[in-house]
Structures are given as structure tokens and as C-alpha cells.
Image (cartoon, rainbow, N blue to C red):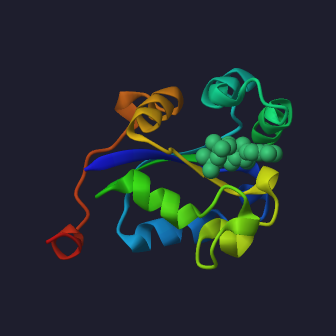
Amino acid sequence: MEQTYVMVKPDGVQRGLVGEIISRIEKRGLKLVALRMNVISEATAKEHYSEHAAKPFFPGLVGFITSGPSVSMVVAGKDAIRVMRAINGATNPVDAAPGTIRGDFALDVGRNVIHASDSPEAAAREIAIHFKDSEIGNYSRIDEVCLYE
Ligand code: IDP
């Protein structure tokens, strides 16, 4: 089973969307194997978004992501990386399809509520940034016998 890193960003926490977002993830069949709320440090935020370090929006992005509590998760399941990106919708919420989290709850690219890793390499890197191995659970959901062929 594939694992991916997911974050409800500070805007999602402030707007009371954590439960709705986790509910969508769980109902889809994806499994939460790690979960934490914390204020991400500036160093961690810079490491997480290092690929964007040279972009003009980088300082604002780091400032925003560290501005209040966010919710970090490791989510597991069949094709979890691709499925989570589809659940989130396009980066710019204006382009995100209705039914996606960004398409239903956001309007501005800098306030797009949720993050999910975009590749297996990014997932491995981001999970290691935000969680220790010992914080990631290993269990079966009782409905896996129905979810998977
Ligand atoms: P992703 O979050 O869909 O993977 P990325 O291109 O990796 O998208 O960008 C990371 C985050 O940086 C986005 O989710 C968004 O919050 C922010 N971002 C990306 N492009 C812009 C921009 O042009 N202006 C402001 N913020 C941006």
C-alpha cells in the first residue's frame, strides 16, 4: 500500500474544515496511519517547500504555513498519492473541479486549504520531514476486505 503526506493548512484549521477533510479521506477508503496538529517551524516549512525557494511567493508561503496550527497526516491506501491529489483538486482553486476539496472550499492559490505529496519521491521526503518512523501506525481497517478486490 502506498503512503502519502497530507497537510490541512492553517486556513483549513482556522475555517473549521479539519473534520470535513478527514471525513472525505476516510470515506474514500484511505487509511490514516499518522496524525498530528502543530505549528510547523520556519525551518521545517522551508525544508518542506524547498523546491519553491527561488519563487516570489516563497516568503509568503512559509509565513502563512507557519502562521498557526496545521494538521499533518500520513495517509495510506491503493494509489494513495494519485488519489489524494485528485481529492484535493488543482493547485489554483479557481481551476479546481467542484467535488474536490479546493473546488468546494477555496478561491485563492495562496489559501488552498490542503497539501498532498505529488510523487513517490516527494511522499517519502515529506513523510520523513514531518514524522518519525515510530509515529506511523500499522493496522488494518476492518472494511479493507470490502474495499479491495
Ligand atoms: P501543490 O500544493 O498543488 O503541490 P505547488 O505548485 O507545489 O502546488 O505549490 C505549493 C503551494 O505554493 C501551493 O499549494 C500554493 O499554496 C502555493 N503557491 C503556488 N503557486 C503560487 C502562486 O503563484 N502564488 C501564491 N502561492 C502559490
Which residue of the protein is positioned furthest toward the top in this rendering? 43
Q: Residue at x 67, y 72 (%)?
A: 103
In the rendered image, the vertical position of residue 130 relative to residue 1, given as above or below: above
Q: Residue at x 28, y 58 (%)?
A: 78
The spot of residue 134 in percent (x, y) is: 35, 30
Res 118 visible: yes
Nearer to me, 132 or 100: 100
Q: Residue at x 70, y 25 (%)?
A: 46
Q: Quadrant of residue 97?
A: bottom right
The spot of residue 42 in percent (x, y) is: 75, 25
Q: How many marks?
A: 0
The spot of residue 70 in percent (x, y) is: 68, 46
Nearer to me, 109 or 115: 109
Nearer to me, 64 or 99: 99
**Where the C terminus falls, by quadrant?**
bottom left
In the rendered structure, the answer to whether residue 109 lies left or right of residue 127 reads right
Q: Quadrant of residue 143?
A: bottom left
Nearer to me, 55 or 30: 55
Ligand 1 shows up in the quarter that is top right
Q: Quadrant of residue 36?
A: top right
Res 69 visible: no
In the rendered structure, the answer to whether residue 89 lies left or right of residue 65 reads left
The spot of residue 48 in percent (x, y) is: 61, 30
Q: Residue at x 22, y 58 (%)?
A: 140
